[in-house]
Amino acid sequence: MSKDREFLWRRLHSLLGVIPVGLFLVFHLSLNFTAIGGEEVYNDATGLMELVPHSLLLLMEWVIIYIPLLFHALYGVYIAFTATHNTKRFSTFRNWMFRIQRMTGIFLVIFIAWHIFQTRIQKAFGATVDWNMMEEIVDNPWMLLFYILGILSATFHLSNGIWSFLVSWGFTQSKSSQRVATYVSMAIFVILSVMGVVAICSFAI
């Protein structure tokens, strides 16, 4: 792969990781966060998606979620297995963030595939994606732990990915601006992590 082409692919990979995949993650976690209000509140919130015509919803899912996510995941795996990690030689904060970013990306490929199988694919076979489905999924403590790890991996991957996006797209070039971006990305990680973990645990209580 030529350097120019690789540069463009990496730019696209970074962009799609934030828009639309990152925005969808925030929407998904916000929707799930309604679970703190109980079964009725959660079912009412998720039920609003059923008001969208099926063909339009399917088109939106593929264009906004599945296609960008598939590209981001596949190219991310390529980056993860071709990148050179130097945490042993240069154990700096950003080197560790780079390494964890790749590790969470690999784990997320497995987690997201399983999550889609348990929800969207089951829905295609006639199951209803509602409170009862999620309650049954996390009734197994190992599955609950798996989901918590998946949520934390996703929130870290997004928040650290935002930092990388700002750098690679030229928004934060100075050390001071990158330091501010680090604090902002950390805040995003904490907020989204709390939302996601509290939501998934709400189904298990």
Image: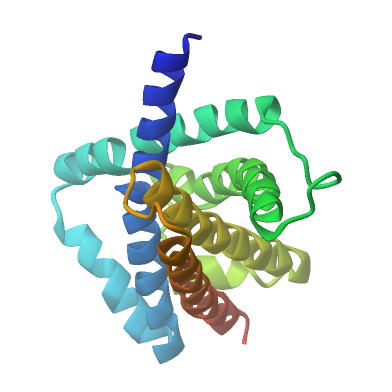
Expressed as whole percent of the image width and height from the top left, the position of residue 10 reads 44, 30
Q: Position of residue 146 (x, y in %)?
A: 70, 61
What is the tally of numbered marks visible in this picture?
0
Residue 110 in which image quadrant: top right
Q: Position of residue 88 (x, y in %)?
A: 86, 46
Image height of 27 relative to 107, above or below: below
Q: Is residue 161 above or below residue 140?
A: above
Q: Is residue 37 above or below residue 153?
A: below
Q: How is the image coloured?
A: rainbow
Q: Which quadrant holds residue 106?
A: top right
Say which of 75 and 150 sits in front. 75
Q: Residue furthest right?
A: 88
Tell me if 100 is positioned left or right of 116 in this view.
right
Is residue 70 at all visible to an observer of this figure? yes
Q: Position of residue 133 (x, y in %)?
A: 51, 65
Towards the viewer: 80 or 127: 80
Q: Residue at x 43, y 72 (%)?
A: 184
Residue 125 placement, left or right of 137: left
Residue found at the far top of this picture: 2
Horizontal placement of 95 versus 184: left or right? right
Q: Which residue lies at the image location 51% right of the left edge and 9% below the top edge?
A: 1
Which quadrant of the figure has residue 51? Answer: bottom left
Could one spot residue 126 in this view of the protein?
A: no
Q: Residue drawn at (55%, 47%), measured in percent from left and top? A: 112
Kindly identify the residue that appears in the image at 47 percent across and 79 percent down: 191
**Quadrant of the rendering where the C terminus is positioned:** bottom right
